[in-house]
Structures are given as C-alpha cells and as structure tokens.
Image (cartoon, helix red, strand yellow):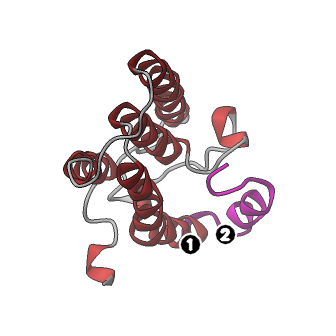
Amino acid sequence: MSSLELKIPPPVVAVCFALFMWQASKLVPPMDLPFGLRVSVAIVLVTAGLAMSIAGVVSFRRARTTINPTKPTAASALVSTGVYRFTRNPMYVGLALCLMAWATFLSNVLALLLVPLFVSYINRFQIIPEERALLQLFGGEYTAYKQLVRRWL
C-alpha cells in the first residue's frame, strides 16, 4: 500500500470523495432538513474550509516553500506561523470541511460517513509520509513543533 503514498494530490482525492459522496447519497434517502438550513450550514462550512486552505497556501508562499503535496522533500522552510500555530495541516482541514459542507448540502448520512474515510486516507497516504520527510529535513525543530501543534485541530 505504500505505493499510494504521496501519489495522488489531496485536492484530487477530495474531488474523488465528493463524487463517491454524491453516488452514496443516491443509495439512501436524504435527511429531512429544510433546504435553507442545509444551504446555510454548507456555506458556513465551505467558507471556513476555503479560508483554512487559502491561509495555509498563503503561509507557504510567504515562507517561499513548496506547496506541492507530492514532493514534501522539496520543502525549504518549516512553517509554524499563521494558521500553522493551530493545525499542522490547514489545507487538509480545509478539504475535510469542504467535504462536510458537501455532505450537509446533500443532506445524507451515508455521504457524511465518507468524510472520516477521507481523513483516514489523507492521514495514511499523505500526512504520515510528509511527516517522515519533514523529520528528515528539520529534525528536532519539527519534533518540537509536532509536540505543540495538533495534526488536524
């Protein structure tokens, strides 16, 4: 399974999960939630998700380090400021929030259950390999950062 490590960019994984969620929503009836409530909650979640992801990208750009998720060994700086004070993976948190927004919009429990699977996939095939690379690149500095800041939230 290590052949999947760092191979598929997380935004592509998120789009695939969104498609799975849409298909899953056809298998079970939607929850009986008012359309206005669903849309309002979905807008809040997607806005928060986009804000987190964009804040992560902006922090990387300011530090002049790579945002390419398939090449963590190309990192030139350990970013621990801005949104990275609260989460080590704001871009992935943002994607998960966007998927939660999609599940809310679909108003479907089965679709919502796919969000934890997305998180598991990203943990196993993206974050763990990234953490290995960052430990090699930044050693004790990264270890100290990991002890201060949670992986997700």
Q: Amino acid at mark 1?
A: Gln
Residue at 26% from the left image edge and 47% from the top image edge: 25
Q: Can residue 131 be found in the magenta stretch? A: no
Mark seen at residue 139: 2
User: Helix or strand or loop: what does disc 1 sit on?
Assistant: helix
**For the view shown, which residue lies furthest in the bottom direction?**
1
Q: Quadrant of residue 118?
A: bottom left
Tag 1 residue: 136
Residue 5 lies left or right of residue 77; in this view the side is: left
Q: Residues within 10 Å of mark 2 (few under 14, many from 20)?
A: few
Of 99 and 129, which appears nearest the observer?
99
Write down the region rendered in magenta.
136-153
Decide: is 135 above or below 109: below
Decide: is 79 above or below 53: below
Q: Quadrant of residue 2?
A: bottom left
Q: Residue 28 in the image: state x and y as whole percent.
A: 28, 52
Residue at 46% from the left image edge and 45% from the top image edge: 96
Q: Residue 32 in the image: state x and y as whole percent.
A: 42, 34
Q: Can residue 139 be found in the magenta stretch? A: yes
User: Helix or strand or loop: what does disc 2 sit on?
Assistant: helix
> What is the magenta segment's predominant secondary structure?
helix
Residue at 43% from the left image edge and 57% from the top image edge: 113
- Between marks 1 and 2, how big is the CA–CA gap? 6 Å
